[in-house]
Image (spheres, rainbow, N blue to C red):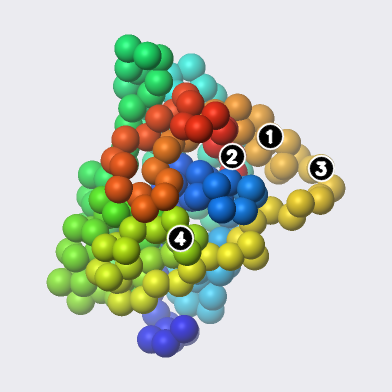
Amino acid sequence: MPGLFAAQRLAVLVDTANMYHCARAQFGGRIDYRRLLHRVVGERSLIRAIAFVVRGEDVDVSPFIEALDIVGFESRIKTGRRRVDGSIRANWDVGIALCAAELVDKVDAMAIVSGDGSLTDVADYLAARGVRVEVYAFDGSVSNELISRAHIFEPLERDVLMDTRYERDDRRDRFDRYERFDGGDNVGNGDDNDEDANNPGGDNNTF
């Protein structure tokens, strides 16, 4: 990838709900966050890696958060508001923007791992401050407007997904317990700002 160098200071911001649903829709798979982080960071200097999570009111997300911590992510958690139909509405757009503003003077590059088109303003702000903007998402499940705002778009492939066959271990058990929770419906071009934590297409969120 052009524009990379070993001493480059990088922050990684991940919209976990968007990534989950895009991976399920496009490949029928689930994100391996260890592989994802390695794919994004490479040999660069990682300053912060932050995963943004939406939870339902009665859902224990601690197994998921613990698993994220193990592979190097900090977590930000938001509890969604329950709507009349029982679904959960929440989004992390403002939170991601505030986090980007907090980190802008500490990094040379920032990776936005999401296909959500509502993050275009974040990309514009970072670029205006001289930060290299990288977007990582599944091709076909990413906003074209977001791509146009980035210095570079790197399409994600199957190599960031969990293996189809695997040996069960404690880490995977944590993933399985968490996948009862449903983390959001920002899929497709990512222009839907609401995350439904109960029933976005009938799937459940996972690590």
Residue 109 image offset from top left, x and y in percent: 34, 73
Query: CB atoms at circles 1 and 2 under 8 Å apart?
Result: yes
Residue 55 image offset from top left, x and y in percent: 44, 29
Query: CB atoms at circles 1 and 4 under 8 Å apart?
Result: no
Residue 198 image offset from top left, x and y in percent: 47, 24
Query: CB atoms at circles 2 and 3 under 8 Å apart?
Result: no
Q: Which residue is pictured at 58% across the width and 65% down the height?
A: 157
Query: CB atoms at circles 3 and 1 under 8 Å apart?
Result: no
Q: Which residue position is annotated with label 3? A: 168
Q: Earlier in the sequence, mark 4 or mark 2?
A: 4
Residue 85 lies, with reference to residue 160, above or below; the image says above
Q: Secondary structure at mark 2?
A: loop
Q: Report the Cα–Cα distance between label 2 and label 3.
A: 15 Å
In this view, the mark in front (4 or 2): 4
Left or right of 6 on screen, residue 127: left
Q: Report the Cα–Cα distance between label 3 and label 4.
A: 31 Å
Residue 57 lies, with reference to residue 113, above or below; the image says above
Q: Which residue position is annotated with label 1? A: 176
Q: Which residue position is annotated with label 2? A: 206
Q: Secondary structure at mark 1?
A: helix
Picture quadrant where residue 52 is located: top left
Q: Which residue position is annotated with label 4? A: 140
Q: Which residue is pictured at 56% across the width and 69% down the height?
A: 39
Residue 142 image offset from top left, x and y in percent: 39, 58
- Dot 2 crowding, Cα within 10 Å, few <14, some 14–19, many 20+: many
Q: Amino acid at mark 3?
A: Arg
Query: CB atoms at circles 4 and 2 under 8 Å apart?
Result: no
Q: Amino acid at mark 2?
A: Thr
Q: Secondary structure at mark 4?
A: loop
